[in-house]
Image (cartoon, rainbow, N blue to C red):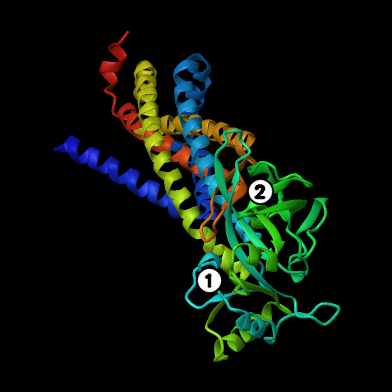
Amino acid sequence: MKSFLRGLGLCLIIVVGIAAWTVLPWPALLALAVLFALWMLLARTGRQAGSVTRVGVSTLPQRIGTSSVVVIGIAGVVAVLVSLLAMGVGYRETLSRSGSADTAIVLRGGSASEVSSVLDHASTTVIEQAPGIARDAAGKPIASPELVVAANLPLNDGSGDEGSVQVRGVGDQAWTLRPEVKIVAGRKFTPGLRELVVGKGAQHQFAGLAPGREIKLGSQTWTVAGVFESGNAMDSELWGDANVVADTYRRGSSRTSVFVRLTGAAAFDAFRAALSSDPRLQVDTSTTLDYFRKQSEGVTKAITIIGIVVGVIMGIGAVFGALNTMFATVAARAREIATLRAIGFRGLPVVVAVMLETMLLALLGGVIGGLLAWLVFNGYSASTLAQGTVGTLSFRLAVTPALFWTGLKWALAIGFIGGLFPAVRAARLPVTTALREL
């Protein structure tokens, strides 16, 4: 019964410790670390814990083989976890850069994305005349009725397989609306002709998209006029004249959305209210910042869940590796620990010393794993079918400081779990039995 209650108590400590470690913000964790350091400096038991820790750490080079099991295991967990989470961060950042608070997108009412929206010509004309829209030097409203369709192109991996790419039909104001879009090779398409400009991400993803090359879209042959770069989701698209794209795909004068530049972020509410109160329209309006943020939520959440599940599975293996290593360490140092207990060292300093040794190894593994993920995967190009689109989205993995910190927290949590039970065993080691061992 006593043994059961002791085990239950240790499990509760683990649950409470991990919950606090997960929920508490870094300033609170820093404050706890400062208090712990003061305890080790000023309290008698704290100084004893420091002495025992120094002895244990000094023997690590002699136990390099067993210690490396903990370090390598935790480094692997952190590297995989951070790399998977970096996919979600890179995907979200790519989409978030596609929007701003002073631009808006108008879709048919009830449409979750562009691909499910259809606006007739009369509606787009009314939207372009709404109040709050900025105007260019010639006095024209900076509004771009656009059409989104899907096309299949051969992938650039030499496999001969085809992938889906999003083709966007735009007008002249699309360039004014999105000043971040720059032609980096070739030229802009000529309105009225079957010409395209392709994003750098699409050019990397699909074959045959160099300036001057011809490709098949629908039943027509198109010429690639140039390559553009935007640094956001538009990099994964092909752009052509909206009227020509509509004729090729038999869409008539309809469009899927209208993008507008507002006179400022403060003008959005009045713009949305004007469209909502117009009886000729049934539309939904949002800032492009909110629109693209919502489009990223589903995929980002799925990637995060996958990363956590994989991290938990690998973390369990790392915990058992840490348990085996630290139990072996405690057994090897049984006489040393018993001697310390015999000359007056209490159980708490021994527990703290073993825990600190394990956490040090875990921290080292976390740093190695985080650096490995950053060196290999930060900026790595990837692509996936984007939510709310009909094509793949190219993006770059982003290993941010926040992800690095997340990896370290996982490493230290694994070290905490892997070191607690061996630490308690070391503190409860019978002194007389241990001293008799050879």
> Residue 322 lies in what quarter of the image?
top left
Residue type at mark 1 is Ser
> In the shown orientation, is residue 157 left or right of residue 348?
right
The reply to whether residue 180 is in sight is yes
- Rendered residue at 64%/43% (across/down): 206
* On screen, residue 114 above or below 349: below
* Residue depicted at x 50% and y 14%: 62
Q: Quadrant of residue 277?
A: bottom right
Instruction: Please name the residue that numbered disc 1 is placed on.
Output: 117
Q: Which mark is residue 202?
A: 2
Farthest-out residue, front:
219
Front residue of 20 and 353: 20
Given residues 82 and 10, the one toward you in this image is: 82
Asked if residue 425 lies left or right of residue 322, the reply is left
- Crowding at label 1, few (<14), some or many (≥20) Cα neighbours within 10 Å? many
Residue found farthest to the top: 438
Q: Amino acid at mark 2?
A: Ala
| Foreground pick, 199 / 418 | 199
Q: Residue at x 75, y 51 (%)?
A: 224
Numbered marks: total: 2
Q: Quadrant of the C terminus?
A: top left
The mark that comes first in sequence, 1 or 2, is: 1
State whether residue 299 is above or below residue 134.
Answer: above
